[in-house]
Image (cartoon, helix red, strand yellow):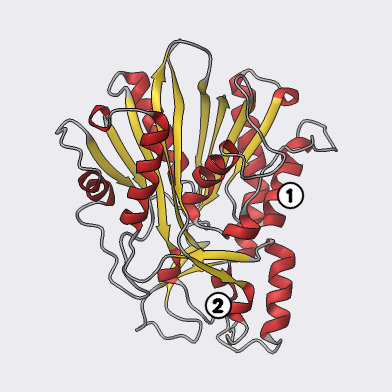
């Protein structure tokens, strides 16, 4: 049976390490546009307790999302040992385009995928590059679209990239600005008929009623809409939405795969918020009547990486495969799940046999 198999991964972590102490001199405002009375030190301490984030990485000024995506792609191609001219599709997930500095215009034409194809020096006119704007689940959505192309016969080899420079769209007066970071992750996915490894099935969900602007763009927390538009988030609403629907979607995905919860080796969950991710996985297992989580079920890198949106899952996968996340190793035949949630609001999940 034809499956789509990940045969190589790559990642690019930017050079600027930003610790929580970086924000000590910030004045934070609430959504009511009134300065928060607590000290920055207290706000940061509470932030760390909830999100688990201690550090994050920002791209140096002038470096764009497409440039980071190119570096991640080069590593994925090298690890997969494929001829780059054989790539049929280049699918790039992002949300803000190329921005060279905070407040820069969001440059999306030509597409980031076209720019990356150019940077990779691919001459094949049948290699089709295109972008996906799908919130944080964008890279996983790219993987789903690559799988559909492979199973339809439209492609044999695809390059899927998630790249983002969220540091360019942060309001420094917003507590949530401490969550976000920059980075890029990539994989080569290829048709596979030689064994049972690859994508088993997928699930998708989109809620665009009252949920549409749980994550959105706005001016500063001081009410100045003449400023560049920044990423904004209704944190409580996002948390409640994720806990209500992500575990349910994960269960639906696993159930439709025909696999057992007891055989699940690892869950690669979008690195959004440590407490939220832990609650999602706990609730997922509770749906199967399991009160205790298996050991080492969910690798995490958010404490050191922050939330870099579409890059979180491919970067995490790359780190696990390279032995950079202690106690987590994948072996042939392992059953894993990928799942993500983000702006839209969108949810997706994949059951995968390694």
Helix, strand or loop for disc 2: loop
Say which of 30 and 75 sits in front: 75
Q: Residue at x 37, y 35 (%)?
A: 78
Rendered view: 66 above or below 87: below
Helix, strand or loop for disc 1: helix
Q: Earlier in the sequence, mark 2 or mark 1?
A: 2
Q: Is residue 138 left or right of residue 279?
A: left
Measuring from the top left, give residue 340's x and y in whole percent.
55, 45
Say which of 175 and 207 sits in front: 175
Measuring from the top left, give residue 351's x and y in whole percent.
57, 28
Residue 208 in sight here? no
Measuring from the top left, give residue 60's x and y in whole percent.
40, 69
Say which of 175 and 190 sits in front: 190
Q: Residues within 10 Å of mark 1 (few under 14, many from 20)?
A: some
Q: Is residue 251 left or right of residue 72?
A: right
Residue 250 in sight here? yes
Distance in Å between CA atoms under marks 2 and 1: 24 Å
Q: Residue at x 32, y 55 (%)?
A: 67
Mark 2 sits on what residue? 174
Please say if the residues under marks 2 and 1 sit with CB atoms less than 8 Å apart: no
Q: Residues within 10 Å of mark 2 (few under 14, many from 20)?
A: many
Mark 1 sits on what residue? 279
Image quadrant in which the C terminus is located: top right
């Amino acid at each position: 049976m034809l499956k789509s198999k990940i045969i190589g991964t790559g990642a690019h972590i930017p050079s600027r390490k930003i610790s929580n102490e970086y924000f000590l001199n910030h004045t934070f405002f609430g959504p009511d546009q009134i300065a928060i009375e607590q000290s920055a030190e207290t706000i940061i301490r509470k932030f760390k307790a909830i999100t688990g984030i201690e550090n994050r990485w920002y791209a140096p000024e002038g470096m764009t999302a497409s440039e980071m995506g190119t570096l991640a792609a080069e590593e994925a191609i090298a690890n997969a040992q494929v001829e780059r001219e054989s790539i049929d599709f280049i699918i790039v997930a992002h949300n803000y385009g190329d921005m060279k500095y905070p407040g820069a215009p969001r440059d999306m034409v030509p597409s980031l995928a076209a720019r990356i194809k150019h940077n990779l020096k691919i001459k094949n006119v049948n290699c089709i590059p295109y972008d996906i704007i799908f919130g944080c689940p964008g890279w996983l959505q790219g993987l789903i679209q690559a799988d559909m192309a492979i199973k339809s016969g439209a492609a044999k080899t695809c390059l899927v990239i998630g790249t983002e420079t969220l540091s360019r769209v942060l309001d420094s007066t917003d507590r949530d600005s401490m969550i976000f970071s920059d980075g890029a992750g990539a994989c080569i996915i290829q048709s596979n008929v030689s064994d049972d490894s690859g994508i088993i099935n997928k699930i998708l969900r989109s809620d665009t009623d009252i949920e549409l602007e749980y994550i959105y763009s706005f001016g500063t927390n001081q009410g100045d809409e003449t400023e560049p538009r920044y990423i904004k988030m209704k944190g409580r609403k996002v948390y409640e939405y994720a806990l209500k629907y992500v575990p349910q979607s994960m269960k639906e995905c696993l159930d439709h795969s025909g696999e057992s919860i007891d055989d699940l080796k690892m869950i690669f969950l979008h690195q959004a918020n440590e407490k939220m991710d832990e609650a999602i996985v706990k609730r997922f297992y509770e749906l199967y009547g399991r009160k205790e989580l298996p050991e080492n079920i969910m690798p995490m890198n958010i404490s050191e990486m922050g939330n870099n949106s579409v890059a979180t899952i491919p970067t995490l996968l790359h780190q696990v495969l390279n032995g950079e996340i202690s106690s987590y190793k994948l072996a042939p035949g392992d059953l894993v799940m990928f799942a993500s949630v983000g702006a839209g609001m969108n949810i997706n999940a994949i059951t995968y046999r390694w």
